[in-house]
Image (cartoon, grey):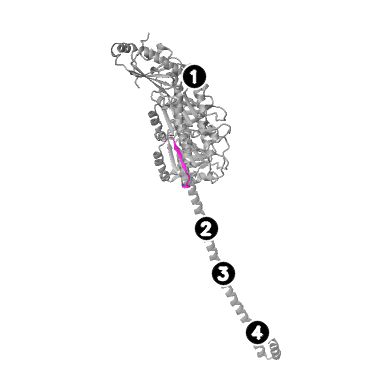
Amino acid sequence: MKKKEPKLIAKSLPKSPTGIQGFDEITGGGLPTGRPTLICGGAGCGKTLFGMEFLVRGATMFDEPGVFMSFEETNEELIKNVASLGFDLENLIKNKKIVLDHVHVERSEIEETGEYDLEGLFIRLGYAIDTIGAKRVVLDTIESLFSGLPNQLILRAELRRLFHWLKDKGVTSIITGERGEGTLTRQGLEEYVSDCVIMLDHRVTAQTSTRRLRVVKYRGSMHGTNEYPFLIDESGFSVLPVTSLGLDHIVSNKRISSGITLLDKMLEGKGYYRGSTVLVSGTAGVGKTSVAAHFAEAACKRGERVLYFCFEESPNQFMRNMLSIGINLEPWMRKGLLQFQATRPTFYGLEMHLAVTHKIVNIFKPDIVILDPINTFVVGDKEFEVKTMLMRIVDFLKSKQITALFTSLTSGESALENSDVGISSLIDTWLLLRDIELNGERNRGMYVLKSRGMANSNQIREFILTDHGVELRGVYVGASGVLTGSARIAQEALENAEVLTRKQDIERKKREIERKRKALEAQITTLHADFESEESEAVKMIETEQEFIKRLAQDKIEMAVSRKSEIKDVKNKKLKNK
Amino acid sequence: MKQKKENPDKINTKEKSSTREEDKWILRLYVAGQTPKAITAFKNLKKICEEKLEGRFSIEIIDLLVNPQLGVEDQILALPTLVRKLPVPVRKIIGDLSNTERVLVGLDLLPVS
């Protein structure tokens, strides 16, 4: 487990880091060094484990050996119990990093006579501390002494002395105590240990339990005051400081594709903003998960990491179903780019879900997180809690610049915009899928209800699931309403026919013109021919006429010759003309 | 853990009548240094034993300041503690043993009145 650098808020008080995930952050560095801390809580809330993890982390991560003095469990039991959390106590004991000491007090074996003190316990603890040079001590649960030793006056005085003595020894100690009625601990240990009190809680609401931790008091230090959910799993304790998140996350201007080309086009042609929160809501069977799967696939293709929380389907079922629309996610899962996390929402409480989400996100470090669907969280009348939880998830993911896609099922009766868990205000891009019933058909439509920071399309698109994924088509909006499905296809056919007719018309017209041109040309040719024949005729006539005139002149001369009169004159004239 | 809850009356009568001679009492007194309480306890113990168990007892004094690890075996918390190792069952009496009657009860040397 990686240790996060604890942010030190106050410098005044030296603190010992616990190494418990998240806890050092809410306490600003850990437990007060050299002082006792009281951990109280009901049965089974993790007190012993907290103490044990404090010691084990101290020994392994901070080189601070520790003593665990158990008043309840025997050493063997303890070793076995914490082995399930990956703590190798036996090895630590062998390497003198940890000493386990089981103190057994049996009421029936003890008879009190006169004055006594608990010096034996002191010596024993002191001896254990000195043998390994312990810096940390856990007393679990010292209240057992109250049932073992009848004289409370002595016991209380001795406990007071013990805590002082621990302080003098300079060891950082944890004292656990069972929670009492109206008090933090059954025997009022908080009177003696007042530097730091931490309360663990295990609450059950609506049949699901959530562990919570609260720093009740921390003398001389700032600390988070909220109740923080925490987790005990195979890697130990982790506390989630989640409620303190504010609205100051970095925003990105980068856009990422939704995986559906036409949807990208509806969103300015670029897709979602990176780090934004997308909600896909709609009634049952409208293809919300398909939209999510597209997004996941597109992200994987870009080489990004996707974390997919399935709350309704098992990963295998999900992948099989997505294959039917041509999305094969299996290779991405094998490559490690895609990780599924399938749990029923009722498996554990909301806080636990939050905690698990945090944990997995921190480990997997995804670029995209998909929660499918979110409204299964709403069991009974818990809308407020669900909203807070989702708000935390949204804030958390935003702070990490992770793009989140939620799907949400809207029931038929309620308004579509009433997004079930009332998280609409948290959402940046909201896609609404709805079915459109028309002509005895049920078709899917999709539109962008809102998309912060972009000029999104206001069109309703028909949403079609094909064997190669989701397709969006423009829908026909006419007098009879929105046309989808076969009505749309009919309309399309109608339009196609019209277009064809027009085309044919144009063709016909073109042919007509051609024909006319040809006719005209033919006419022109005829006219030309006519003209040519006329012209040649005219030329002939002119020639004939000229011949005639010539002949007439000739005749005149010949006539004059025959008369022999003024022949000379004629001859002269003739010569002159020449 | 050996822990028998038998009627002390029964045991006492039995011990007194039949097995008294074979009884060898081993007592251990845990202390931490020569504190007034420790000294008082030892004095009281010696007195009681000499009165009730003359010659049949041995007292071992363990100073936890010298041998702190010895306290673990008998689960010593309070000091001074008197541990009856034999006869079984193991009994523990804490305090300075000033209340003789309770000591006797604790050691099964006296029937509860």
Q: Which residue in the protein does label 4 denote? A: A553
Question: For the residue marked with disc 2, what is the amino acid?
Answer: Lys
Are the residues tagged 3 and 1 within 8 Å (C-beta)? Answer: no
Q: Is residue A274 magenta?
A: no
The crowd level at tag 1 (other Cα within 10 Å; few <14, some 14-19, many 20+) is some
Q: Which residue in the protein does label 2 denote? A: A510
Are the residues tagged 2 and 3 within 8 Å (C-beta)? Answer: no
Which label's residue is closer to the chain start, 2 or 4? Answer: 2
Residue A152 visible in the shown view: yes
- Chain containing the residue with disc 2: A
* Rendered residue at 58%/75% (across/down): A537
Question: For the residue marked with disc 3, what is the amino acid?
Answer: His
Q: Secondary structure at mark 1?
A: helix
Quarter of the image with the C terminus of chain A is bottom right
The label on residue A218 is: none
Alpha-carbon span between mark 2 and mark 3: 27 Å
- Find residue A340 and report its horizontal and vertical position in percent: 43, 39
Q: Which residue in the protein does label 3 denote? A: A528
